[in-house]
Amino acid sequence: MPAPASTDPLDEAGRLALLATGDLVVEGRMPWSSNATFLCQVWPAGTAPMAPLALAERDERDGDDEAGAELPEPPARAIYKPHRGERPLWDFPDGLYRREVAAYLLAGALGWDLVPPTVVREGPLGVGSLQWFVEADYAHHHFTLVADPVHHDQLRRLCAFDVVANSTDRKAGHVLVDGDGRLWAIDNGLCLHAEWKLRTVIWEFADEPLPAEVADALDRLVGTDLPDDLAELLDPFERDALATRARALLASGRFPVDETGHRVPWPLV
């Protein structure tokens, strides 16, 4: 089933403000995630109802046969990834939640709405990332989307983004399409490493010339300092490596080719 068309009245600034200051109510843990990942309701500060579990316990205690019936629909949902829920990795520094936010800020610096609004904030399990939840058609992923040329311009941007971001885990299922046909890149915690670690499923455009708008975005990025909020999330080596990747992609004028055939994540979806 296609995802419903967006009816969200908030602009990006409004979404960021709600994510940063809203009350969080955890609905449940997301399945199949390597790290602790939670779906949360987001309510304007001071307006959150009783948590669903607490409400159900109250209804059971009071003998209410309509337990859960009074749960209202939240104005927004978000994905919460607490720092304390991260599994240590031998090849990435601690604090993947910061890279989720850095990926959002990098996409913004390029002028591309590819990553849902994401912030660092305190949550029920401590500091972590909070990312706007995308209502998507979850039957689709990169391999189904790339079959339709209508998505190719967006996928070319994402391909370039992943090179610059050094995305290390761009699985097909990390590319979503919403009800308006917009593509979103999620699960960006493994990115922006100082060492070259690109692993992605998006190789359909290998050796194609960069579209002019992609080259222009790269030129703007390398022509100025990184935004302060992005720079402070990366160490000096990571900042230098980011700039080097962007300059190299721009200088080549073409999407990269995987000569090894091994620069793909596993599983692919």
Image (cartoon, rainbow, N blue to C red):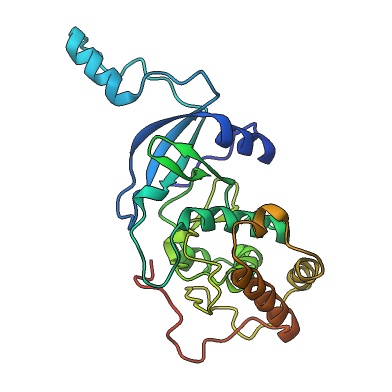
> In the image, is 48 to the left or to the right of 8?
left
Residue 33 placement: quadrant: bottom left
User: How many numbered marks, from 0 up?
Assistant: 0
> Where residue 251 sits in the image (x, y, percent)?
75, 84
Q: Quadrant of the C terminus?
A: bottom left
Instruction: Give the residue at the far bottom of this rendering.
Output: 259
> Where residue 91 sits in the image (x, y, percent)?
41, 73
Q: Residue at x 66, y 34 (%)?
A: 14
Camera-side residue: 155 or 35? 35
Residue 257 placement: quadrant: bottom right
Q: Which residue is drawn at 57% across and 36% down?
A: 20
> In the image, is 49 to the left or to the right of 150?
left
Residue 264 vs 172, above or below: the answer is below
Q: Which residue is drawn at 76% across and 66% down?
A: 221
Residue 31 vs 63, above or below: the answer is below
> In the image, is 80 to the left or to the right of 88?
right
Camera-side residue: 196 or 116? 196
Instruction: Give the residue at the far front of this rendering.
Output: 236
> Where residue 74 sits in the image (x, y, percent)?
47, 26
Camera-side residue: 131 or 175? 131
Residue 19 vs 100, above or below: the answer is above
Q: Which residue is drawn at 30% across and 50% down?
A: 31
Residue 151 placement: quadrant: bottom right
> Where residue 119 sits in the image (x, y, percent)?
56, 45
